[in-house]
Image (tube, rainbow, N blue to C red):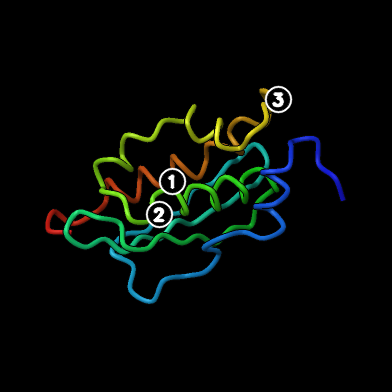
Amino acid sequence: MTLPYGGTVLEHFRRPRNHRTLDRPTAAHEGYNPLCGDRVRIELEVEDATIRAAAFTANACAICTASASLLTERVTGVTVAAATELTDAQVLDALGAPLPPARLLCGILPVRTLRAALAALPARA
């Protein structure tokens, strides 16, 4: 199977990292793309304002799955403040190949879902 989106997307789609649920997430959020039906859930374990673990589950296309995989790798071990500052463009760049305009939301749905999970964190996390 080959995909027109590059090796990074294919690798993370075939072997997604952090594709699981967390036992005790501090925060979680589910995002949905009504245009294509992608659904992704991001779960976080946060301690002392640092993301100790990040995981996802998804019923989504290759792009969305790869993006969630890359994203959870990137934010594990970083501060909540640093994770909050991730931009849509940074996440799309990490995919390693340009996406057609109709597929951009597939690529940024995980980071938008991450932001919503971070916004819902308790003040003491």
* Residue 122, x across and y down, in percent: 18, 57
**SS state under label 1:** helix
The amino acid beneath tag 3 is Pro
Residue tagged 2: 29
Q: Please, is residue 88 above or below residue 111 in the view?
A: above
Q: Are marks 2 and 1 in contact (CB under 8 Å)?
A: yes
Q: Residues within 10 Å of mark 3 (few under 14, many from 20)?
A: few
Residue in the image at 51% along x and 63% along y: 18
The amino acid beneath tag 2 is His
**SS state under label 3:** loop
* Residue 4, x across and y down, in percent: 80, 35
Task: Give 94 or 88, whichever is nearer the viewer.
Answer: 94
Residue tagged 1: 113
- Mark toward the start of the polypeptide (2 vs 3): 2
Q: Residues within 10 Å of mark 2 (few under 14, many from 20)?
A: many
Q: Please, is residue 112 above or below residue 19 in the view?
A: above
Q: Quadrant of residue 42?
A: bottom left
Q: Quadrant of residue 16?
A: bottom right
Q: Quadrant of residue 22?
A: bottom left
Residue in the image at 55% along x and 36% along y: 94
- Mark toward the start of the polypeptide (2 vs 1): 2
**SS state under label 2:** strand
The amino acid beneath tag 1 is Thr
Dot label at residue 100? 3
- Image quadrant holding the C terminus, namely bottom left
